[in-house]
Image: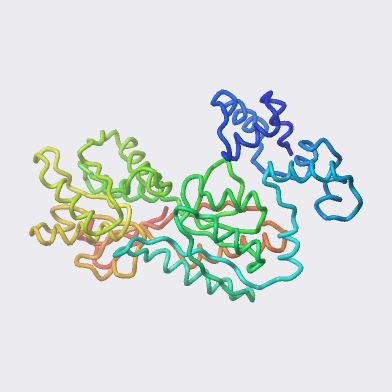
C-alpha cells in the first residue's frame, strides 16, 4: 500500500506539501497540487495519515513516535517537541480515540440530524432515520442524535469524539467532498454513510444509483412515445441531484433525442418551486412544450401535478409526470404517481451493518454499495395502469 512519503517523492514535493494538497487544509500552488493528485492517483493512494508519516516528518523512528504519543518511554524534550509538532502539522491523532471507544464502549451511535429549511421536509431521510435506529438497536446499540451547523459541520463530531460519547457515527445527506467525512477519515473514527462524497475517498457507504433511476424513468417515457421530455432538478452542486440530471441526459442521448435548454429547470426541493417551474415549461411555444416532466423528487412532482390540475390539464393524458422516492402518499394522489422506489429499510440495515463491521475492526469485503432504485409505473405517466407495476432496474 502506498504511503504519503511515496506520493511526495513521486510528485517531487515535501511531505507536508503533499498532505496539504490532498487534505485541502492549506493552499498549495496549483502546479504542485496537480502533481500531487496525479501521483496519488498513479499510486492508488487515498489520504490516510499513519504513524509512519509522523515519523518521516519528524525524522525519527516509528518507535520513538509511539513512545511520545503514548508517553511510554523516556524521550528528550527536543525530540518530543519535534514529534508533537509533526503530529499536529499532519492533524494526526493516534488511535487513542479508537482504542478508548473500543475498550469502554458506550453502545451509542452518533447521528447528526439532516438540515431542513424552515417550511420544508425531508420524508425520505425521516424514514431512513427510523429504520436506521431500528437496525442499530438490533445490534444492542442506541442512537444519539445531535444537530450540526452548515457553517461548522464538524464541530459537533469533534466534541463527541473528544468526550468519548459514542462508539461511531452514521452519516446521511452527504454531499460532494463532505467535510464531515473528510474529518472522520482523518480522525480514523468508525463510521458509515448513506450517500457518497468523493470517488477518491475510501470509506464505507451505501447509496442509491440516482443516475440510473432517472435514466430508467426517462427510458419509460420515451418508450411511451414522448420525445419532448422536460426535467425539474435541484440547483447545480448537489452530488445526488447532479447524478439524477445526468441520468436524464443519458437516456435522451441513447434515444438520439437532443434536449432543449428550455426543457431543463433547476430549483429548490419544494412543491411551490416545482409548480413555478412547471408554469414556465407550459408557456413554451407549442412545438417546444413538453409532453412529459421528470422530477428528481416526489415533493417536486406533487407540486407539478397540483399546478397541472389547477390548470385543467390531465396528468397522464395531456402531460406525464414522474417523481423519485416513492413516498407513501404518491400512491394516493390523483392520479397515482409514477416514481422510483428506494428500499429505505434495506438501505438503512446495510449502512448499519457496515458500521458494525467497522466497530469490530472486521470490515466487510464490499464496503461501497450502490443500489439501483425500482421503477414504479402508475397512471401519472401511463393511464392504462390501474394500480401499479414494478419494472426491473
Q: Work out which residue is located at the far right of the displayed protein and give it.
A: 74
Residue 52 is situated, as x and y percent measured from the top left of the image, at 79, 41
How is the model colour-coded? rainbow
The residue closer to the viewer here, 245 or 104, is 104
Q: Quadrant of residue 160?
A: bottom right
Residue 287 is situated, as x and y percent measured from the top left of the image, at 11, 38
Instruction: Say above or below: 11 vs 146.
Output: above
Point 8% across, 58% down: residue: 311
Residue 42 is situated, as x and y percent measured from the top left of the image, at 64, 29
The residue closer to the viewer here, 204 or 146, is 146
Instruction: Say above or below: 139 vs 71.
Output: below
Q: With 199 as the anchor, is 216 left or right in this view? A: left
The residue closer to the viewer here, 135 or 277, is 277
Q: Work out which residue is located at the far front of the displayed protein and give it.
A: 77
Q: Quadrant of residue 124?
A: bottom left
Q: Quadrant of residue 386?
A: bottom left
Point 40% across, 45% down: residue: 243
Point 13% across, 47% down: residue: 282
Residue 4 is situated, as x and y percent measured from the top left of the image, at 71, 36
The residue closer to the viewer here, 165 or 273, is 165
Q: With 186 as the anchor, is 118 left or right in this view? A: left
Please identify the quadrant where the N terminus is shown: top right
Give the number of callouts.
0
Q: With 284 as the anchor, is 265 left or right in this view? A: right
Instruction: Say above or below: 156 vs 66.
Output: below
Amino acid at each position: 500500500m502506498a504511503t504519503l512519503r511515496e506520493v511526495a517523492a513521486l510528485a517531487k514535493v515535501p511531505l507536508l506539501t503533499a498532505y496539504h494538497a490532498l487534505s485541502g487544509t492549506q493552499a498549495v500552488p496549483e502546479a504542485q497540487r496537480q502533481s500531487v493528485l496525479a501521483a496519488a492517483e498513479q499510486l492508488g493512494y487515498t489520504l490516510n495519515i499513519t504513524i509512519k508519516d509522523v515519523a518521516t516528518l519528524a525524522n525519527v523512528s516509528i518507535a520513538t513516535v509511539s513512545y511520545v504519543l503514548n508517553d511510554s518511554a523516556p524521550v528528550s524534550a527536543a525530540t518530543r517537541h519535534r514529534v508533537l509538532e509533526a503530529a499536529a502539522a499532519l492533524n494526526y491523532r493516534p488511535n487513542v480515540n479508537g482504542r478508548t471507544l473500543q475498550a469502554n464502549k458506550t453502545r451509542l451511535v452518533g447521528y447528526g440530524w439532516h438540515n431542513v429549511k424552515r417550511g420544508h421536509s425531508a420524508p425520505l431521510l425521516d424514514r431512513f432515520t427510523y429504520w436506521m435506529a431500528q437496525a442499530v438497536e438490533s445490534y444492542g446499540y442506541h442512537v444519539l442524535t445531535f444537530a450540526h451547523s452548515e457553517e461548522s459541520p464538524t464541530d459537533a463530531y469533534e466534541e463527541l469524539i473528544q468526550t468519548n460519547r459514542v462508539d461511531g457515527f452514521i452519516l446521511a445527506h452527504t454531499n460532494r467532498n463532505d467535510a464531515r467525512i473528510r474529518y472522520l477519515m482523518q480522525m480514523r473514527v468508525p463510521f458509515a454513510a448513506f450517500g457518497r462524497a468523493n470517488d477518491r475517498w475510501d470509506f464505507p457507504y451505501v447509496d442509491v444509483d440516482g443516475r440510473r433511476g432517472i435514466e430508467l424513468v426517462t427510458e419509460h417515457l420515451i418508450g411511451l412515445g414522448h420525445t419532448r421530455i422536460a426535467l425539474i432538478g435541484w440547483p447545480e452542486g448537489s452530488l445526488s441531484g447532479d447524478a439524477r440530471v445526468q441520468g436524464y441526459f443519458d437516456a435522451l442521448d441513447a434515444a438520439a433525442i437532443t434536449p432543449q435548454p428550455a426543457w431543463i429547470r433547476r430549483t429548490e426541493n419544494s412543491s411551490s418551486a416545482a409548480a413555478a417551474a412547471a408554469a414556465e415549461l407550459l408557456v413554451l411555444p407549442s412545438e417546444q412544450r413538453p409532453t412529459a416532466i421528470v422530477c428528481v423528487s416526489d415533493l417536486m412532482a406533487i407540486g407539478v401535478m397540483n399546478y397541472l390540475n389547477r390548470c385543467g390539464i390531465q396528468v397522464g393524458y395531456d402531460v406525464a409526470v414522474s417523481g423519485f422516492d416513492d413516498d407513501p402518499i404518491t400512491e394516493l394522489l390523483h392520479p397515482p404517481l409514477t416514481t422510483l422506489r428506494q428500499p429505505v429499510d434495506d438501505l438503512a440495515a446495510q449502512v448499519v451493518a457496515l458500521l458494525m463491521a467497522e466497530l469490530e475492526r472486521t470490515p466487510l469485503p464490499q464496503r461501497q454499495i450502490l443500489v439501483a432504485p425500482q421503477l414504479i409505473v402508475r397512471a401519472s405517466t401511463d393511464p392504462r395502469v390501474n394500480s401499479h407495476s414494478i419494472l426491473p432496474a
